[in-house]
């Protein structure tokens, strides 16, 4: 055994834990089901790309019961016995649906609000505590435990490297946005500015886009999206921060973050043709940022960490196909 798992048991000592693979929806949450099972109506029908521009997204008018069913179907690993609609709001129903009785599920690790990928849940406080300690210790030792896949609009200058930036949350026009801070002072650090770090590696390029592997070594709101904007290569479907990248005569540059309002990402005509999207469809493009791999501790302290993998959402795979990119 090499420790890699996609849809099977991974850790006999992980009591009352489970992982699900999720995909965002325009209202904030969606699911890709187990074994790449697609939601009703998303089957590809005409040609290799099908009719739907974003296969794998669930509809906006999803009921609580349908979301619980989709979450249960999206469990990729499980140990133990058999106002706004969000993952947190339906955890009690999901717990009941999985036969956990009065044991409450809690989120141990998850991707960002608009990102797809693994969500790690546990109904055992001891297990949750152990996992959190593992993640904290790994972060302090600068050992990445999470690996994301991203498609970027633009190709990073370097094929791999580190992205370091001091970030802060700032309330702009009624919205909390992540803003870079140049040369932060000690006072800035005390007032919530955090030094952040991510590893990146370009996996493939094509049509002016790149498939990038991202490994955050710190945790901050929208860290990966902002880090890629600082590389002048916003994540495809980033309708919040991509507006900070301007273009003049084909040359990209950064606009001031504090004075640049979020807006729908604008893609050039050549890219729209490659993606087989209209401008109105591109305005609804999901964020192409996916928590693909997560490392978990082995049963014993000296065991090699175990790797949990989440398959790509169908819309993400469709984009890779359109751009001629391959995930190695």
Image (cartoon, helix red, strand yellow):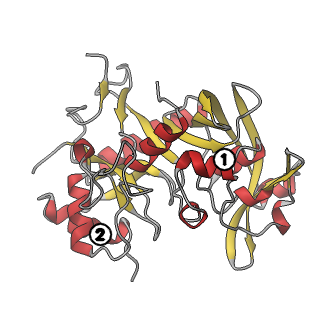
* Circle 1 residue: 270
* Residue 90, numbered circle: 2
Residue extending furthest toward the front: 47
Q: Looking at the picture, does residue 12 appear above or below residue 113?
A: above
Relative side of 224 to 32, left or right:
right
Would residue 97 appear left or right of 229 to someone viewing this image? left
Which mark, residue 295? Answer: none
Q: Can see residue 70?
A: yes
**In the rendered view, would you say 261 is above or below 118?**
below
Rounded to the nearest angstrom, the CA distance separating label 2 from label 1 is 41 Å
Q: Which residue is depicted at the point 51% across and 39% down?
A: 148
Answer yes or no: is residue 17 visible. Answer: no
Residue 70 image-quadrant placement? bottom left
Q: Quadrant of the N terminus?
A: top left
Query: Can you give x and y, in whole percent of width and height, for residue 246 in the image?
Result: 83, 54
The answer to which quarter of the image holds residue 306 is top left
Front residue of 85 and 24 = 24
Q: Are marks 2 and 1 in contact (CB under 8 Å)?
A: no
Farthest residue to the top: give it.
Answer: 1
* Residue beneath the point at 15% across and 57% down: 98
Assess disc 1: are there few (<14), some (14-19) or many (≥20) residues with their C-alpha within 10 Å of its C-alpha. few
Report x, y in % for residue 13: 23, 34
Residue 311, position in %: x, y?
A: 35, 39
Q: Is residue 319 left or right of residue 258?
A: left
Q: Nearer the viewer, residue 276 or 220?
A: 276
Mark 1 or mark 2, which is nearer the start of the sequence?
A: 2
Q: Residue at x 28, y 28 (%)?
A: 299
- The residue carrying pointer 2 sits among few (fewer than 14), some (14 to 19) or many (20 or more) residues within 10 Å by Cα, namely some
């Amino acid at each position: 055994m090499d420790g890699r798992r996609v849809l099977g048991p991974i850790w006999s000592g992980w009591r009352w834990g489970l992982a699900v693979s999720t995909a965002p929806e325009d209202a904030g949450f969606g699911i890709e089901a187990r074994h790449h099972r697609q939601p009703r109506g998303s089957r590809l029908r005409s040609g290799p790309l099908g009719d739907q521009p974003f296969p794998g997204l669930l509809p906006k008018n999803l009921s609580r019961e349908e979301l619980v069913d989709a979450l249960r179907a999206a469990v990729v690993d499980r140990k133990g016995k058999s106002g706004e609609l969000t993952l947190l709001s339906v955890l009690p129903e999901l717990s009941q649906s999985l036969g956990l009785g009065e044991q409450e599920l809690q989120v141990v690790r998850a991707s960002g609000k608009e990102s797809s990928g693994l969500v790690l849940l546990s109904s055992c406080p001891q297990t949750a505590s152990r996992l959190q300690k593992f993640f904290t210790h790994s972060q302090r030792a600068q050992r990445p435990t999470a690996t994301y896949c991203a498609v970027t609009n633009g190709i990073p200058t370097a094929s791999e490297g580190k992205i370091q930036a001091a970030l802060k949350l700032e309330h702009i026009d009624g919205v909390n946005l992540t803003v870079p801070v140049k040369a932060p002072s000690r006072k800035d650090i005390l007032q919530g500015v955090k030094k952040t770090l991510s590893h990146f590696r370009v996996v493939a390029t094509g049509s002016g886009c790149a498939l990038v592997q991202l490994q955050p070594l710190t945790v901050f709101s929208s860290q990966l999206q902002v880090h890629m904007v600082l590389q002048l290569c916003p994540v495809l479907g980033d309708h919040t921060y991509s507006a900070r990248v301007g273009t003049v005569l084909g040359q990209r540059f950064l606009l001031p973050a504090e004075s640049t309002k979020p807006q729908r990402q604008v893609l050039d005509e050549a890219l729209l043709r490659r993606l087989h999207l209209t401008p109105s469809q591109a305005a609804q493009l999901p964020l192409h940022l996916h928590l693909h791999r997560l490392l978990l501790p082995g049963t014993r302290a000296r065991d090699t960490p175990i790797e949990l993998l989440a398959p790509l959402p169908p819309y993400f795979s469709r984009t890779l196909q359109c751009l001629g990119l391959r995930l190695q």
